[in-house]
């Protein structure tokens, strides 16, 4: 009986611990990604952004998405890849007016994805 109760409590503690780590990891990753995208947006807005700036963000994203595949749906990751690829294409062509909306979408995605992993009533039911 004692072993069973101990096992149950250890399992519950592990579930809560892993869930907490997942939530904080996703929030931290997307906060870093959001700050990089915001800086890129400001540079693109002023016409100073280069393809290399966007390429550095893509490298950051590629490194981070390896671990995010465990926690996030693949469609969310594909959406970020798609939007980022289009934004980089526009930056390569120096079409800043076309790149800005794509970067805005990426910034919004960075805010929405962590919200889906926070402990909120709407996420539970």
Image: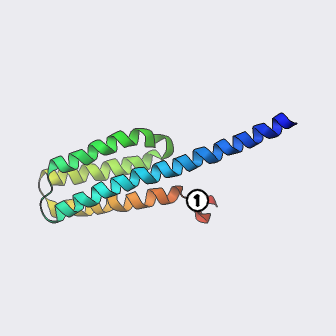
- In-image side of 18 versus 80 (left or right): right
Q: Quadrant of residue 61?
A: top left
Task: Let me know if residue 47 appears in the view.
Answer: yes
Q: Position of residue 51 (x, y in %)?
A: 16, 49
Marks counted in the figure total 1
Q: How is colour applied across the structure in the image? A: rainbow
Position of the N terminus by quadrant: top right
The answer to which of 8 and 72 lies nearer the viewer is 8
Task: Let me know if residue 98 appears in the view.
Answer: no
Q: Residue at x 53, y 55 (%)?
A: 117
Residue that carries the numbered disc 1 in the rendered image:
119
Q: Position of residue 124 (x, y in %)?
A: 63, 59
Q: Is residue 92 above or below residue 99?
A: above
- In-image side of 14 versus 53 (left or right): right
Q: Is residue 65 above or below residue 106?
A: above
Position of the C terminus by quadrant: bottom right
- In-image side of 53 versus 62 (left or right): left
Q: Residue at x 34, y 53 (%)?
A: 33
Q: Position of residue 53 (x, y in %)?
A: 19, 50
Q: Is residue 1 above or below residue 75?
A: above
Q: Residue at x 59, y 63 (%)?
A: 120
Q: Residue at x 43, y 52 (%)?
A: 28
Q: Position of residue 118 (x, y in %)?
A: 54, 58
Q: Quadrant of residue 113?
A: bottom left
Q: Quadrant of residue 87?
A: bottom left
Q: Residues within 10 Å of mark 1 (few under 14, many from 20)?
A: few
Quick one: which residue is furthest to the top in this view? 3
- In-image side of 67 versus 47 (left or right): right
Q: Helix, strand, or loop for circle 1?
A: loop
């Amino acid at each position: 009986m004692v072993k069973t109760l101990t096992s149950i409590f250890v399992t519950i503690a592990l579930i809560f611990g892993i869930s907490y780590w997942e939530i904080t990891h996703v929030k931290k990753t997307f906060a870093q990604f959001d700050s990089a995208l915001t800086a890129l947006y400001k540079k693109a807005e002023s016409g100073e952004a280069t393809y290399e700036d966007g390429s550095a963000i893509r490298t950051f994203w590629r490194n981070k998405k390896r671990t995010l595949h465990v926690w996030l749906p693949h469609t969310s990751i594909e959406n970020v890849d798609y939007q980022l690829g289009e934004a980089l294409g526009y930056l390569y062509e120096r079409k800043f007016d076309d790149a800005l909306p794509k970067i805005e979408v990426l910034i919004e995605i960075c805010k929405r994805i962590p919200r889906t992993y926070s402990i909120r009533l709407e996420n539970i039911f």
